[in-house]
Amino acid sequence: MHVTSFVYHETEEAEAKEGPVVMSVSQITPTLFLSSADAAQNQALVSRKGITLIVNATLTQLSPSYRGVQCLRVPVSDLPHAPLGDHFERVAKRIHNNRTGSTLVHCAAGMSRSPSLVMAYLMRYKGTTLREAHRWVQESRPCIRPNSGFWQQLLRYEKTLYGKNTVTVAPSLELNSGDPPINFSLYRSPRRAKYSMYR
């Protein structure tokens, strides 16, 4: 089994180049989309994509009120200690059970909370490992970077589902109570990250 150790390095240049991606709607599956909060406020876009369920993973962004569109709130902050994992099962099941159209999952920027929820869904209902789920989402939306606490919660969820983990946190980045928030992830692009593979 391959295990990936990952360390995330962000640069201002990368952030600037990814601006248009952050604002876009990324298609994960034929009926699942991931975006920033702006996309959910675009009624024409929501209609064009056939979206009938919006998952709003923000604390303050109001959910839109569109005819034929249901909204699910996940009021969690984008901080490592925030209990996003408490919502993994509920959100994944709701996405899975949405048979009337497509689902849009969003947070503020579509970079941390919403990708984490989508990865949990892929593990739960598409049979992927966390490593596979991350690559799947990252290929569709290169700007994703769940915070360190969400990674820890995803790791626990993967362990619950499969009894093992397919990625591991570099020891220096493990989340301790005194640590500052650290963003890290696995990226193949040299300008975004360095990572090592080992058995």
Image (cartoon, helix red, strand yellow):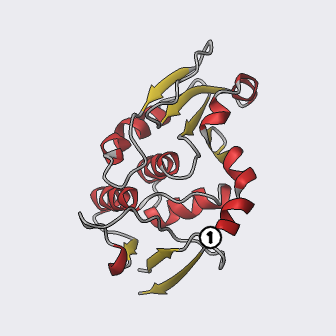
How many residues crowd mark 1 within 10 Å: few (<14), some (14–19), many (20+)?
Answer: few
Looking at numbered disc 1 in the image, what kind of residue is underneath it?
Thr
Left or right of 33: which side holds 162?
Answer: left
Secondary element type, mark 1: loop
Image position of 155 (left or right of 70): left
Residue tagged by mark 1?
Answer: 11
Q: Quadrant of the C terminus?
A: bottom left
Please tell me how many numbered marks the rendered image carries: 1
| Residue 175 vertical placement versus 157 (above, below) | below
Residue 135 percent coordinates (x, y): 57, 64
Q: Residue furthest top?
A: 67
| Residue 97, placed above or below residue 119 | above
Q: Position of residue 186 (x, y in %)?
A: 53, 71
Q: Give coordinates of residue 67: x percent, y percent.
A: 62, 12
Q: What residue appears at the point 53 percent right and 41 percent down from the top-left corner?
A: 107
Percent x, y for residue 169? Answer: 37, 73
Q: Split into 4 quadrants, where in the image is the N terminus?
A: bottom left
**On screen, residue 92 above or below 157:** above
Q: Nearer the viewer, residue 135 or 161?
A: 135
Q: Between residues 151 and 23, which one lies in front from this camera angle?
A: 23
Tell me where residue 174 sits by quadrant: bottom left
